[in-house]
Amino acid sequence: MTEASSGVRERPTSPHLQVWRWHVTMLGSILHRACLMGLFVGALILVGWAVALASGHQAYAAYTALLASWPGRLVLLGLTFALFFLAASNLRHLMWDTGRGFQPKTADMITIAGIVFALVATAVVWLIAAQTGGLS
Amino acid sequence: MSAKAGFRTPLSRARGLGSAKHGVGHFIADRVSGLALIPLSIWAAYGGLKLAAGGYGMAVEWLAHPINAVLLSLFIAVGFVHLRLAIQVIIEDYIEGFVAKSAALIANYLVCVLGAALGVFAILKVALLGAF
């Protein structure tokens, strides 16, 4: 009390990650931006694939071998999740743009739904890939 | 002075640093491209599964199909439009300093334009000329 009244009170600063109480919409927001940055690289990987295909048999074989390596697969797995999560998250933002879904319960629910959708869709795609020989 | 002008502080008016009036266009382009990418992304995952199961010849054949060539070109073009807008916002939020921020914004713009041009050209080359 004496401290506060004796001088100029310290102004509140912007909330940083470490002082926030964790909640799922915060995770959704961070994931959204992280996925965007990942997909920036992913888009360039896709362009590289098209260029390799246009460059001929040898270039394509070398490029796809790189993608099929374990680090390559890990990157593609992450990109699959990012692609599906962004699709769901963009839909979520479109809903929010109409002014709907801002009740904490609804906002949490649609965020969780987006994450679950991305996880399930990624698992389904990679299971199909394993079945059809894409992972041989 | 009109009531509307009163909302701006004198300093802000003097600096001329108000809204650049580009916000709405950016917002709408971001949301519409994001919406277009939802079906394109699902199609791309489906296409990726097909391509992963085959080799070079199968990929050339796949891309020679007009629907695949058009949809993949759209996926790349719309994807880079969306990424350019979205990454721009992230850069504006996190990178400080005029020079660093400007450099990042210009690099973002140029990489996206180059990526889209390169991707679409490579697709057209395969689709129109086939394998060599």
Image (cartoon, helix red, strand yellow):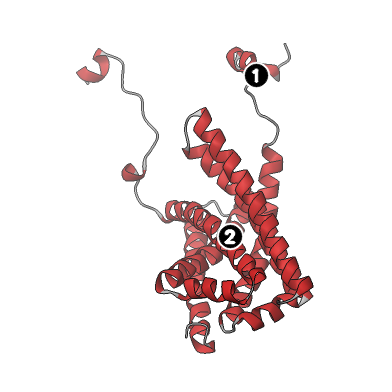
Give the residue furthest to the left.
A2
Which of B90 and B70 lies nearest the eye of the viewer? B70
Q: Quadrant of the N terminus of chain B?
A: top right
Residue B91 image point, x, y percent: 52, 41
A67 lies above or below A18? below
Whether residue B74 is visible: no
Which secondary structure, mark 1? Answer: loop
Residue at (38%, 38%) from the top-left corner?
A: A15
Residue bearing mark 2: A43
Alpha-carbon distance for marks 1 and 2? 37 Å
Which secondary structure, mark 2? Answer: helix
Horizontal arrangement in the rendering, residue A7 relative to residue B18 (left or right) = left
Horizontal arrangement in the rendering, residue A133 relative to residue B83 (left or right) = left
Residue B39 image point, x, y percent: 67, 68
The image's mark for residue B16 is: 1
Residue type at mark 1?
Gly
Query: Residue A60 is drawn in which quadrant?
Result: bottom right
